[in-house]
Structures are given as C-alpha cells and as structure tokens.
Image (spheres, rainbow, N blue to C red):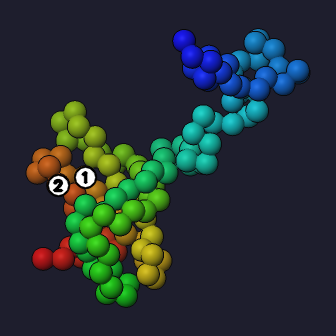
Amino acid sequence: MSSLAAARADNFYYPPEWTPEQGSLNKFHGQHALRERAKKIDQGILIIRFEMPFNIWCGGCQSMIAKGVRFNAEKKQVGNYYSTKIWSFTMKAPCCKQEIVIQTDPKNCLYTIISGAEQKK
C-alpha cells in the first residue's frame, strides 16, 4: 500500500474534546453530512445539480435556455408511478430569475415542463 493511500484512510481531524461516545464528527459539529445541500431536508427537498435535458424558452423573458445548461435545483418527490418515484425540480432561470418547474414522467421516460417555461419545438 502506498503512503498516499494510508494517509487518506485517517485524514480526519479529531478535536481533543471529541470522544467516540459522541458519535460521528458530523454529529459532534452539529452538521448534516451533505452540509448546505441538505438545508431543507426536513421538507423533503435536496439541492442538486440539474442539467437541462432539452432546449426551452423562458416564460418570463422569452429567451432560450439551451440543452446542457446546469442549474442548482431543488429536488422533491411529488408522487409515484407504480413503484417509481416522480421527482420535481425547481430552479431559477439565469436570465430573469423566473422559477422553472420540471417533473419526471416515468410512464413515457421523459421530462415535462410544469411551469415557468415552454419546450422549444
């Protein structure tokens, strides 16, 4: 084993006041393991990085948002299709801060725009 691999195994700082009875370091510091991404986890919302699956027109300013543009989006489960979860992604358009909501459609294997934009035909 290389010395680098050994260093990664114990590359955590344990403060002198921490004891194993207090649990993990995250619990000791009062933080969630996902940090800022889990700010709204109690509401069932997780912050994720979402990539636009197709070209759309913004509903606020009518500018085009291209396929592949990435957003920080709020991911929330809104239902089920049989045993598959239906997810809703809420993000703000970079041009005018219009809120865009996109949902998964497991029945048709697609994404559908719920509000804030229109798919380019």
Considering the image in quadrants, where does the C terminus appear? bottom left
Image point (28%, 56%), residue name: 103
The number of numbered discs placed on residues in the rendered structure image is 2
Q: Residue at the spot x=88%, y=21% of the render?
A: 17
Quickly name the residue at label 2. 110
Q: Is residue 33 left or right of residue 98?
A: right
Q: Is residue 65 left or right of residue 84?
A: right
Residue 35, compared with residue 10, is above or below; it is below
- Look at the numbered discs 1 and 2 and tell me whether their residues touch, using CB distance below 8 Å: yes
Q: Residues within 10 Å of mark 1 (few under 14, many from 20)?
A: some
Viewer-nearest residue: 118 or 34: 34
Q: Amino acid at mark 2?
A: Leu
Q: Position of residue 33 (x, y in %)?
A: 60, 34
Instruction: Identify the residue at the far bottom of this view.
Output: 61
Q: Secondary structure at mark 2?
A: strand
In the image, residue 116 above or below residue 8: below
Does label 1 or label 2 sit earlier along the sequence?
A: 1
| Viewer-proximal residue among 78 and 35 | 35
Farthest residue to the front: give it: 2
Name which quarter of the figure residue 118 lies in. Answer: bottom left
- Residue topped by disc 1: 104
Residue 109 lies, in percent from the top left, at 14, 49
Residue 67 in picture, x, y percent from top left: 27, 67
